Image: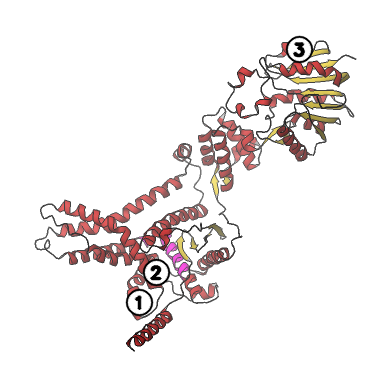
Amino acid sequence: MKTTHFLCFAGAWASVAERMRKFVSKIGGQAVLEGVMMRGEKSVATAVRTPDGRIELETSRIQQEEKWWKKVPVLRGFLNFFYMLIIGSKVLTRSAEVYGEDVGAPSKFELWLAEKSKKSVMDIAIYIGVVLGVLFAIGLFVALPLGVVTLLEFIPGFAGIHYVWRNLIVSGVRLIVLLGYLLLVSLVPDIKRVFMYHGAEHKVITCFEQGEDLTVENARKMSRLHDRCGTSFLVITVFVSVIASAFLPTFDFVGNKMLSFLLRFASRLALLPVVAGVSYEVLKGLAKFDNAFVRVLKKPGLWFQKLTTREPDDGMLEVSLTAFKKVMEMDADESIPALRFHVKKDYRIVRAGVLADLKDSDEAEALADWIFVKVLGVERSLLPTVEFVEEEQAEQAAAYALRVKEGEPLQYALGETNFYGIDLKTDPRALIPRGDTEVLVEEALKCLRDGASALDICTGSGAIAIVLALKSGAAVTASDVSDDALALAAENILKTGAQVALVKSDLFESVEGTFDLITANPPYIPSAEVDRLDAFVKREPRLALDGGEDGLDYYRRIAATVDARLNKGGVLLLEIGAEQGDAVRALFDKIGKVEVIRDLEGHDRVVKVTKDV
């Protein structure tokens, strides 16, 4: 019978406890500069009101990895506290970037900082601020109260006071310091507005927890105080520390007050993780229930919240509702993509960061120019007029610069290059088209007439063939022995709309017919010199660079068979190395008239062979 009575009593108590349990939203929040961050189970959303009145949204997904410590009481509270500190600092930084005002041209220090560290003053200030903030909090709420008690011990009769009273005095000083600090910061206009957004955050969450429709009108009627507020957490830590400190040694070294202070400080510093973890569990536990006893325990935290919250205006409630609804939407549908704030970066600072990565490259300024031409889509001549770039553009420019820093040719990093006014795709499958080759193209276009036939061997990316097809009325064929090169050439032909027939062939081996014009930019670097080339050039296919022992292997092979493929009066144009004119000329003397064409710098660049009629 007694067992039956006990079970009935236990069941009744459980039923009462369940009725007293409150509905608690799984979404929490934080006020930021001119906005609110809301964090759900699977996502985070931050809404910020911009200076021109728009609401900007930034969202992200929370990694759903199951951490073992999330199931360990106290430990989860301490680790979650630091996790939220990091998240909160990042969100504050982002909101400041969205709402930040134009402060004019960057200083020399800002440019120097960007070049040396690739960080803005704001980034560095946030890092320093977080560290200083933690140190300041430890000094204000741990060291200062202990220091007050240590000074009091110099008063006759106080040194022998019971340690329980000493701990209560320490906690009392903490509460006074916390109260004074909150009163002081609330005088700052920007902080007042943050406190108003803090109130907006609480009102929206309470509106949801009470089952009301999420509207500005309903949210306005809610209390700006909330059980799960961080302010309540701070107050709870004060009371928990009283209990926790009771288990610590008193460290009463009568003859050495400084040693007593240092040991007490160190012991309480070591106790902070436990205090934070227990306080987190207490805050969560109290938030789940609503009865007379629990309300008494919540009162101190709610009193202090009257200092850290202010009544928000409707615009602030709208911002908070926007963030809350977005988190609900993303938590319910994992396919919704993340959003980013529309943030502009100072071009000069971004460029300084890019140049920091390019500093070891030749012509770093020119490389930076071409990176920004690609990223911004403007002419190079207009770059000096650029003031701001989008954040995504800044990140893309930094990514390109990093790839160049790691040894990748700029054209491969950008994925394209401009050859003879035509944008072509470039990657490691083929040699990068260069301006030197445009000398050959200029001469080729002079030789072509409507209806003529042209063949480009060793075509690589297809650059020469594509220009000839687009700029003349000739029927153009292109060949290469490399499958990779032909695949890239095919992509460029499709990209440009050029009419070019592709053939896989080792020089003329698989090519059929004869032609009025044959062009080639064959490998012409001596084998021994390939390994001494610039690091960027060595990233290009060796097959397109290595011309054999003296660099003339391909010219000899071409000279041996080209006569049968060239129509009478036809022209052969070959790109050559800067000092190969005479050697290559000698190989083609028997075919017809041979000329060596120089580039603008006076170097041998093209051998032109005109077949006898």
Q: Residue at x 25, y 65 (%)?
A: 242
Residue drawn at (20%, 53%), measured in percent from left and top?
263
- State left or right for residue 99 relative to residue 167: right
Pick the residue in front: 276 or 153. 276
Which label's residue is closer to the chain start, 1 or 2? 2
- Give the residue at mark 1: 294
Vertical comparison of 488 with 579: above or below: below
Which numbered dot is residue 585? 3
Horizontal and vertical percent position of residue 572: 81, 20
Rendered position, 17 above or below 500: below
Q: How far is the residue under mark 3 from the one under mark 2?
A: 87 Å
Q: Which one is in front, 473 or 484?
A: 484
State the SS at label 3: helix
Instruction: Specify the quadrant that holds the C terminus.
Output: top right
- Locate residue 346, reporting x and y percent: 53, 44
Q: Earlier in the sequence, mark 1 or mark 3?
A: 1
Q: Is residue 190 magenta?
A: yes
Mark 2: secondary structure: helix
Give the residue pinned by disc 2: 284
Q: The residue tagged with tag 1: helix, strand or loop?
A: helix
